[in-house]
Image (cartoon, rainbow, N blue to C red):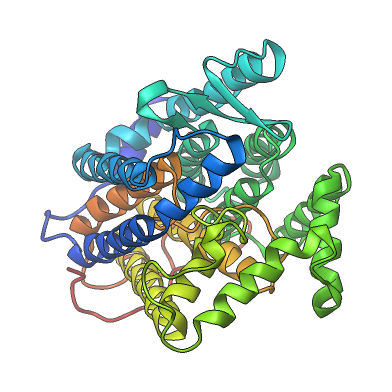
Amino acid sequence: MTRSQRLAERSDDAVGRRHRPDYQIALYMGLLMLLGLVVMYAIGPQRANVLNNAYDTDFYGSTYFFIKQTMSLFLALVAFVVASFVPYRLLLNNAGKILVAGFIACVALLFFGNILHVDAITQCSLGACRWFDLGPFGSLQPAEFLKFGVLIFAASFLGMRAKQGLINDKSQTLIPLGVVAGLAMLFVIVIQKDMGTGVSLMAFLSVMLYMAGLKYRWGLLIAGILVAAGILFILIAPHRIDRVTTFLSGDASTLDDAGAYHITHAKIAIGTGGLAGVGIGNSVQATGYLPEAINDSVFAIMGETFGFVGLVAILSLFTALLMRLLKVADHMPNVRLRLVVIGVFGWLAAHVILNVSAMVGLLPLTGITLPLLSFGGTSMVFIAAALGLAFQLSRYTVFGSKLKSDEYKDSQRGRGVRGARNTGRRRTT
């Protein structure tokens, strides 16, 4: 990077005085985490009994999953605090290094898991290696680290290109970002066989590109490429074909159809909950009927436990958190910072939409976690870190939408960077 480019980048990142951050981001995140901990305390013993019976062991105690989730919550809070205080410029200026570290982690998992089959440090199941085994410290999923790296890199890269008026330049913007996205999909979807994580990654990248000012014709072309790639990824994996055919069969699916078992019991759980739910600790589906009751299917278990009213409250918390992120993004003083917050918004929204839609039968099952609520540490830690970064950036919001229609113009398009809906002239706090 030349001296002039560094000076332009430094000028682009100029912000006003620090002020009170948006504590509602931390509030909504904390409420969701605590709710997930309560549910884990309630259904953890049932899950432990299922695993003990399945593997003929007494390894899993009644508080095993509650303790593990508590540890994950603590690590997530640490990640949130660290991301809140580490200067955002340090992250953005080292975006390339963070991205490379994410790819190195994925390559290491491929080498030790798929090639050498070192079971001592990797976790593989059903033909997929997705985790490093950290012993008493749990496990680490490199795909989540890679997602965080892609978010930081894309925000920095697109922000610089937007300032230069090159968002729609094929050779300097779209192809380089396409290479990064293609490599990420190769590792996450093809090698690690994690379609849900790959879809969420492409979702927040697409949102960031749109908000950066991508031309509609390029957007349609990219959308077509992603749809074609998605169809290819489905066709090369028999279990994905089963999930799609089960989804397309709709109500014609029965419990005799193995592919329909999961979604059928998810709907039974939500339907059993009725208006007010069966109460904490009274879930039947968590006793072994509903697969992945504490992970991907936790939304259905919450529906059974808390009923329709409880699910509305949970979705309201997610909606409130997402709206705060949009408001912060709309009041960012420059395009790079706006894209960071928009990326966090897209990441969180993609997980919520994909998980909830799958549980109610609106989309095929993708095996994706419900943020901050599902059991598992890596996803919670990195989402909390992303929210911590957005929380830090909320200290630098301005009174109105800083990006005017004549700022960061695209020389090939003649239009400025897109902004979120202006939510008012008052300072975001």
Which quadrant of the figure has residue 326? Answer: bottom left
Determine whether 374 is above or below 142 in the image: below
Which quadrant of the figure has residue 354? Answer: bottom right
Q: Horizontal placement of 366 versus 22: left or right?
A: right
In the picture, which quadrant includes the C terminus? Answer: bottom left
Q: How many marks?
A: 0
The residue lying furthest to the bottom in this view is 275
* Front residue (pair 398, 238): 238
Which quadrant of the figure has residue 185? Answer: top right
Q: Horizontal placement of 262 versus 78: left or right?
A: right
The percent coordinates of residue 234 (x first, y second) are 82, 50
The percent coordinates of residue 36 (x first, y second) are 36, 59
In the picture, which quadrant includes the N terminus? Answer: top left
Q: Residue at x 30, y 65 (%)?
A: 328
Q: Residue at x 57, y 62 (%)?
A: 355
* Front residue (pair 42, 334): 42
Determine whether 241 is above or below 326 in the image: above
* Front residue (pair 15, 80): 80
**Can residue 221 be seen?**
yes
* Front residue (pair 163, 274): 274
Q: Residue at x 61, y 20 (%)?
A: 107
Determine whether 227 is above or below 189 in the image: below
The percent coordinates of residue 372 (x first, y second) are 39, 55
**Can residue 410 be seen?**
no
